[in-house]
């Protein structure tokens, strides 16, 4: 059996195992939106809570509708079942990526037990390559406990300013404590990267040299730099703390997020290179390296080592598609991409592209061919 069908079959087996284990409780996992959502570029986002207690001024979580902090109701096994039932997800290792921290701080004291439970259950069942982004202070003991659950876990520690953190992140732990977190995670052997996102114009760029070089001294493997995204309310909050961004506000309607000040990001990337830091093009890139994997799905790649890109053949792809009753007109497997041609009238579920991309780690293009 080829790698794609083998993964698909294993996913069905994991679902069955978890459904049997959970009995009636499986129903709410199957209804949950982790069982339906498409992965984002960084992977499938996993939410141990929605909303956050820290209220950073640049945070867009409230504008996404998560105004109250609420621990997520699912247990670890239920989240594993939801993910195993999501058609877009391919089980690992070298499957779909998973990211904790998109709509909450996943290591807040009140939910860190739940986050650990989720990581453990994912590692024991569907084996996705997981990543956590955090601003928390983490002790060496806690870092060790996390490593024991998943020793390939990718860690991102966010610092966007040391001098102005009180203005920008009034309730979050002091960045000096976050530098200690970098030391503690790294000392435990966890792949730890500085997350300099969002880059705040006039602040993060001025401090970038110090932040990056200090993070490297504390054991960070490199840095990810990300642009600031604003909504109307974020612009207002930033102005109150003295960050005034030149921008045509008429483009901001409702809770829409717009990326601004890309030049700030570019400046920081140049500084990072001067400091000698590895600059990861994106969070998924650090996750792939942390797990000793590789990926060439997008033009930012290759990430990881090219020799780790999975071997995949035309017959592997045909075998999977035939098992779900899909007939192809042609399949081309290139070094960096896969093209699959189907009849124009054929109904192709959109998870097919995501699933094959996650396992092959190449870009998949679906083409339609007239009869
Ligand atoms: S820690 Fe993250 S999720 Fe929480 S308020 Fe700050 S930016 Fe938002
Ligand atoms: S090639 Fe790199 S940046 Fe692009 S999706 Fe893959 S891991 Fe992410």
Image (tube, rainbow, N blue to C red):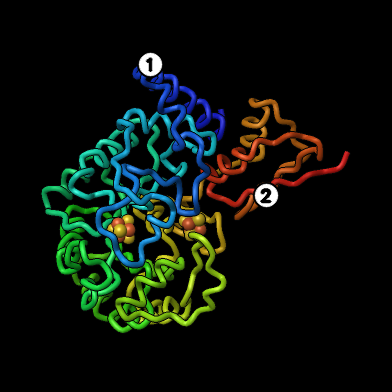
Q: Quadrant of the C terminus?
A: top right
Q: Which residue is mark 1?
A: 24
**Residue nearest the observer in this picture, 280 or 106:** 106
Q: From the viewer's perspective, is 189 left or right of 208? A: left
User: Which residue shows up at 28% across the image and 49% down it?
Assistant: 106
Which quadrant is the N terminus positioned in? Answer: top right
Please tell me whether residue 214 is drawn above or below residue 351 in the rendered image. below
Q: Between residues 202 and 370, which one lies in front from this camera angle?
A: 202
Nearer to us in this view, 366 or 132: 132
Q: Residue at x 24, y 40 (%)?
A: 116
Number of residues whose C-alpha sits closer than 10 Å to that of mark 2, classed few (under 14), some (14–19) or many (20 or more): few
Disc ID at residue 238: none
Image vertical order of residue 121 relative to residue 132, above or below: above
> Secondary structure under badge 2?
strand
Q: Secondary structure at mark 1?
A: helix
Q: Residue at x 49, y 37 (%)?
A: 90
Q: Which circle's residue, 2 or 1, is located before the other in the chain?
A: 1
Q: Where residue 280 appears, x then y in whole percent?
A: 40, 65
**Residue 165 visible somewhere in the drawing:** yes
Ligand 2 under 8 Å from disc 2 Cβ? no
Q: CA distance from mark 2 to mark 1?
A: 39 Å
Looking at the image, residue 282 sits to the left or right of residue 150; the answer is right
The numbered dot on residue 365 is 2
The x, y position of residue 241, in whole percent, is 30, 77
């Amino acid at each position: 059996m080829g790698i794609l069908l083998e993964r698909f079959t294993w996913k069905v087996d994991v679902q069955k195992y978890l459904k049997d284990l959970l009995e009636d409780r499986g129903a709410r996992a199957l209804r949950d939106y982790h069982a339906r959502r498409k992965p984002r570029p960084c992977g499938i986002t996993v939410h141990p809570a929605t909303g956050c207690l820290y209220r950073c001024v640049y945070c867009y979580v409230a504008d996404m509708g998560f105004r109250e902090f609420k621990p997520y109701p699912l247990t670890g096994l239920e989240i594993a079942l939801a993910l195993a039932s999501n058609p877009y997800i391919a089980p690992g290792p070298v499957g779909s990526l998973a990211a904790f921290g998109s709509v909450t701080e996943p290591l807040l004291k009140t939910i860190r037990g739940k986050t650990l439970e989720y990581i453990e259950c994912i590692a024991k069942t569907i084996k996705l390559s997981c990543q956590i982004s955090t601003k928390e202070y983490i002790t060496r003991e806690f870092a060790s406990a996390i490593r024991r659950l998943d020793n390939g876990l990718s860690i991102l520690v966010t610092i966007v300013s040391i001098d102005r953190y009180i203005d920008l992140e009034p309730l979050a732990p002091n960045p000096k404590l976050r530098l200690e977190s970098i030391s503690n995670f790294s000392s435990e052997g966890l792949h730890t990267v500085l997350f300099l996102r969002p880059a705040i114009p006039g602040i993060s760029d001025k401090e970038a040299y110090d932040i990056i070089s200090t993070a490297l001294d504390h054991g960070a493997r490199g840095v990810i730099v990300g642009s600031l995204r604003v909504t109307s309310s974020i612009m207002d909050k930033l102005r109150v703390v003295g960050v005034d961004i030149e921008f045509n506000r008429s483009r901001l309607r409702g809770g829409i997020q717009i990326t601004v000040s890309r030049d700030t990001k570019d400046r920081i990337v140049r500084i990072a290179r001067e400091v000698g830091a590895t600059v990861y093009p994106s969070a998924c890139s650090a996750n792939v390296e942390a797990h000793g994997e590789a990926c060439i799905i997008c033009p930012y790649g290759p990430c990881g080592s090219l020799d780790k890109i999975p071997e995949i053949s035309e017959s592997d792809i045909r075998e999977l598609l035939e098992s779900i009753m899909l007939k192809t007109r042609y399949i081309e497997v290139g070094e960096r991409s896969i093209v699959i041609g189907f009849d124009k009238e054929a109904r192709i579920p959109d998870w097919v592209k995501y699933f094959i991309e996650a396992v092959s780690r190449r870009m998949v293009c679906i083409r339609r061919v007239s009869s």
